[in-house]
Image: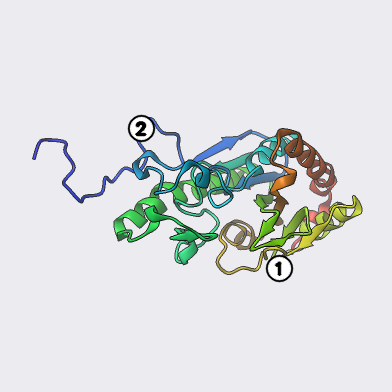
């Protein structure tokens, strides 16, 4: 076998080439706000080594691959609030940053009725590649940003920003926004009140729940540290344009600014 050639059937240990971007993007790292924003499903990018996972371009543009509009809202919100943000740089179809790695939805073989051929019959090594080279570095970046705030004497609030489809399984969703949380209501309650006071139809732990035992980020970064936190979901059709994302980022910033200066937000839970 010629030098440097990979044996047939072997798996290259490096998932990302040197020319590819890292599995996360950090924005406004020195932002002064007592806040860290994360966007788990910011990108629909698939590493070159995995091709297209057996999907066409149209499928990879759908919500199954990423949270449409969420990245743009995250970028703008981070700027408006002068807060650091960490965004994923790989598709949730490759490995989902917001699912525990021991559940089937972590690397879904099927998503919203669409089969994902590139996720079937994976070896332990292939699964480990995705966990160690994508999932783990992204969450390590989130942890570093949180630790940097704490090292500077600030126990930050955490916002996990997501989006959801207007229609799912043939049912129209009535809410424009949703607030997901588990036990800690320091941010969720006033945020719900602020959105509803503006006439915005807002779900409280629907259409998804912050109490899901399969989800990862809210529990690993928020609950585990005792930091005030909330997962915000926005309906994709209200943020899928630049103007819509801007408008929603401004609305969230308007509600969040007084909460970030209110001692009640940072009281012991």
Direction from residue 145 to residue 23 in the image, left or right: left
Give the residue pinned by disc 1.
183
Give the residue pinned by disc 2.
18
Q: In the rendered image of this protein, does residue 112 appear above or below residue 257?
A: below
- In the picture, the quarter occupied by the C terminus is bottom right
Return the disc, 2 or 1, that comes first in the chain's sequence: 2
Do the numbered discs 2 and 1 sit on residues whose CB atoms are within 8 Å?
no
Q: Nearer the viewer, mark 2 or mark 1?
A: 2
What is the number of the mark on residue 143?
none
Mark 1: few, some, or many residues within 10 Å (few <14, many ≥20)? few
- Residue 56 lies, in percent from the top left, at 45, 44
- Label 2 sits on a secondary structure element that is loop
Direction from residue 93 to residue 66 in the image, left or right: right
Q: Front-most of 118 and 99? A: 118
Q: How is the image coloured?
A: rainbow
- Label 1 sits on a secondary structure element that is loop
Q: In the rendered image of this protein, does residue 154 appear above or below residue 2?
A: below
- Residue 95 lies, in percent from the top left, at 46, 53
Q: In the rendered image of this protein, does residue 185 appear above or below residue 137?
A: below
Q: Residue furthest top?
A: 19
| Picture quadrant of residue 253 | top right
Is residue 76 visible in the rendered image? The answer is: yes
Q: Front-most of 99 and 170? A: 170
| Picture quadrant of residue 251 | top right
Residue shown at the point (46%, 46%) measured from the top left? 137
- Residue 163 lies, in percent from the top left, at 66, 50
Mark 2: few, some, or many residues within 10 Å (few <14, many ≥20)? few
- In the picture, the quarter occupied by the N terminus is top left
Q: Front-most of 216 and 196? A: 196
- Residue 34 lies, in percent from the top left, at 72, 44
Q: In the rendered image of this protein, does residue 32 appear above or below residue 122?
A: above
Alpha-carbon distance for marks 2 and 1? 42 Å
């Amino acid at each position: 076998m010629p030098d440097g050639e990979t044996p047939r059937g072997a798996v290259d240990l490096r998932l990302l080439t040197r020319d590819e971007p890292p599995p996360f993007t950090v924005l406004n790292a020195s932002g002064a706000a007592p806040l860290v924003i994360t966007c788990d499903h910011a990108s629909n990018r698939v590493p070159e080594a995995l091709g297209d996972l057996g999907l066409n371009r149209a499928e990879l543009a759908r919500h199954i691959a990423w949270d449409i509009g969420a990245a743009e809202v995250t970028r703008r919100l981070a700027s408006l609030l002068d807060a650091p943000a960490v965004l994923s740089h790989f598709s949730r179809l490759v490995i989902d940053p917001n699912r525990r790695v021991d559940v089937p939805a972590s690397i879904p073989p099927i998503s919203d009725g669409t089969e994902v051929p590139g996720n079937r019959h994976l070896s332990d090594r292939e699964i480990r590649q995705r966990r160690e080279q994508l999932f783990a570095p992204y969450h390590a970046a989130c942890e570093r940003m949180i630790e940097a705030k704490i090292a500077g004497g600030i126990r930050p609030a955490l916002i996990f920003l997501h989006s959801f489809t207007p229609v799912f399984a043939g049912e129209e969703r009535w809410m424009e926004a949703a607030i997901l949380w588990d036990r800690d209501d320091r941010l969720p309650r006033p945020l719900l009140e602020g959105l509803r006071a503006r006439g915005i139809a807002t779900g409280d732990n629907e259409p998804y729940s912050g109490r899901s035992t399969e989800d990862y980020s809210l529990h690993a970064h928020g609950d585990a540290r005792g930091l005030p936190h909330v997962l915000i979901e926005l309906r994709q059709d209200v943020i899928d344009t630049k103007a819509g994302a801007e408008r929603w980022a401004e609305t969230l910033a308007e509600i969040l600014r007084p909460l970030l200066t209110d001692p009640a937000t940072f009281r012991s839970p």
